[in-house]
Image: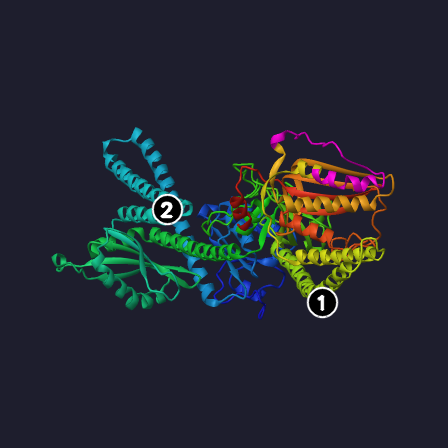
Amino acid sequence: MKGSLFSLPDPVPEGAVLLGPTRWIDPDLTIARGCRLFSDPGLAIDWLQADFESAKAQGGVSRLVFLHQDAFAGQEGSDQLVEWLDRLRDLQGPYLTILLHGNLPGNNLVSYFRAGLFDAITVPVDRLEWVNMLLRAEKRLEFRNQSRLILTQTGQNQEILRTMRKQLEGESASVAGELLRAQETLEIANRQLTNAMAELTLLYRFGRELSSAPNWDKVLRKILKNLSDFVGASGGALVLRSTPEGQYRPRQTWHWEDGTWEQVLLNLQDKMDRTVAESLMVPGIFNMESTNQVESSGSRRVIALPLEHHDKRLGFLLLLYSGGEERESSANRFLPFLQTVQLMLAEEVAGAQMLDRIRDIGSFNAQVLETVRSAIWVIGESGQTIYCNRAGVELLTGVAPMPMNPDEFLFQIGRGRRDQEPCETDDRPELILDSRLQLDEIPGLLLPALRNQPDGVYRGEGQILRSDGDGIPVLIQTGLMPGVDQDQELLVVVAEDLRETRKLESERIRSDRLESLVEMSATLAHEIRNPLMGLSAQAELLAEHLTEEDPRARYLEVITGEVGRINDTITRMLNYVRPYEPALAVVSLPHLVRDSLELVRKRAEKKNQDIRILESSSAENDSTAEETLLDPTQIRQVILNLLINAVDAAPMNGTVFVSLHQKQNLDFLDQTSGTHRICRGLELEVRDNGPGFQEGDLEKIFRPFFTTKSSGTGLGLSLCQKIVSAHKGQITANREQEFTVFRVLLPRREPQLSVESVNQEEAN
């Protein structure tokens, strides 16, 4: 139909078979050109089979079969088209199929070509592309007909030979000459068949070597050598250009003098365009004068075959001959063979250039992913890692990977990093399979929970458990992406490291608090201590005028004591806001606990309280495991503060218990770095059966100046937290059953390490 997207430009080949929707082509046009129009694929294949059987005696009638995309519409259309092409190929008839389509996916086209499709043209059809396709089809059919004629002629000659042998039995010696002529004819046919088989074998080898070789340098040189030897050329060259507008450069040569290249390229530029424009599929033949003075009396000839793909010239295949006669003889004898080599090389070079562009894009994408600071994983449907970038490897293992080639898209991480191939080592962690990822809002199985999110999109916080025991806080974002296989969906996980964010936030809050405390402390120290000095001096003057028996001396002692207490409060407040660095020394923490307990025992006895150390539940109670590196003065202050608070909070006849445990896997939050740590450490617990905390007090209990005592300053617990954090530890408060529990977690540092090495480790 005129104006249709699938309309065919002139000329329409005579005798063509058209398979497509009804009224696809003007019926008058099909009748005029002797074409057959079908809308049912089954009827079309039946007619072609009958046509082939009826014309088999004459060697079959060559036909072009044009397939309309809609003839195989629907969800199963692609499989039906492959099956239809297989049936047509089984006929072994002289048919070539051309598919008219509207930009089908590449993987579908590959399956059609494997099933026997000759060519595929996108619509609307460009007339120049249409004519080029018809020329290629004509050459392909001509090559098939020549092969069929050779085989037919061979069969006829064999039949003649059999007939001649029967006649020889009853004939005289006069027919010997006819027998010799028949034998000569058979030998010629056999030579033709042998040459055709040699050509087919060589073409098969060329195609296999080009398709399977990882590097073309050696393969191209070998092909040029074999091709030159086969067609009688003295040398050969493959000239290509990397870009459509680039200059021609030799890709590979065989026995070609370097001094002749300038002349060859000038001939290509000046003459090839004009000659090839007349007939794209015929080799251009050029004369080239030799630059060698020894051969100045003669000339050397070149056969130049242009390599074309989709109307783009990729380069030339050049064959060098020692003279014009050799060139003419080779061109006449091997013309169909050379044209087949020309077509094969053009397709292979175009495919190689496309792969190079794909590699460049992939290399660029890999470099981009490697520079991204966010950790990126691509997770398969069963939870295995398909891809992981450098940031992900470092975040999951704690070790920065070695720089790798950007062409290697899959980095060595996880047991399932390649979807089908097994991993050589099973000691590398998997993000999902090894439960290294934990999300705050998803306590159960992660993979189904994430994949069941709308479009797989999730955003939330959690932590990644590293091999070294640290828990890295992360912000997780996920999404689904299509995989390589049909209906495959891969899960993309992007993790942002929150350690710096939390550390900066903690530092900001601490800085804000310290800034306000410093200002307030400086003001209080100045405004309060000056009057206190005056009160203390006046009290001392009054005491000098009173005798020891005067009852008013007792009031002066009270005034002096309260002034000292106020001064001590100001001193503690100033100690809190000052920067603090632990003075590490080898200390036995159990000895510190026992000494501190003895200091507060009298205070507990006044309330008739049971205060004692519970037996440790750890098996590590040997004396060598008791010593560690701590600041003894400050840690003793923490223990005393906790014990005094427990004694004050416990009722009359109450209980205060202290326990100390040494643990191999102590899990706690390092406030200075914002990470969860799992290491050897010490756990100190102070329990009392006092009334505990009111609702909301736990969130404020370590804040400066917050206290539940009527006479407290609120600086004791905040100072304890400062000391424990400086030791890279953690202090918590909880209510467990009838007990209030303060728990101090401290990482254990071996006494064999020097204080300088520990400080250097913390600085790193």
Circles 2, 1 touching at the beta carbon (< 8 Å): no
Residue 494 place in picture, x, y as percent: 61, 54
Q: Residues within 10 Å of mark 1 (few under 14, many from 20)?
A: few
Asked whether residue 447 appears in the rendered view, the answer is no
In the picture shown, does residue 183 fall above or below 377?
Answer: above
Q: Which residue is mark 2?
A: 206
Residue 527 disc label: 1
Residue at image location 29% in from the left, 39% down from the top: 187
Camera-near label (2 vs 1) is 1
Given the current orientation, which residue lies at the most extreme right position? 652
Q: Nearer the viewer, residue 388 or 149?
A: 388
Label 2 sits on a secondary structure element that is helix
Residue 320 or 219: which is nearer the viewer?
Answer: 219
- Which residues lie in the magenta part? 595-624
Whether 394 is among the magenta residues is no
Q: What residue is at 87 percent from the left and 39 percent from the top?
A: 653
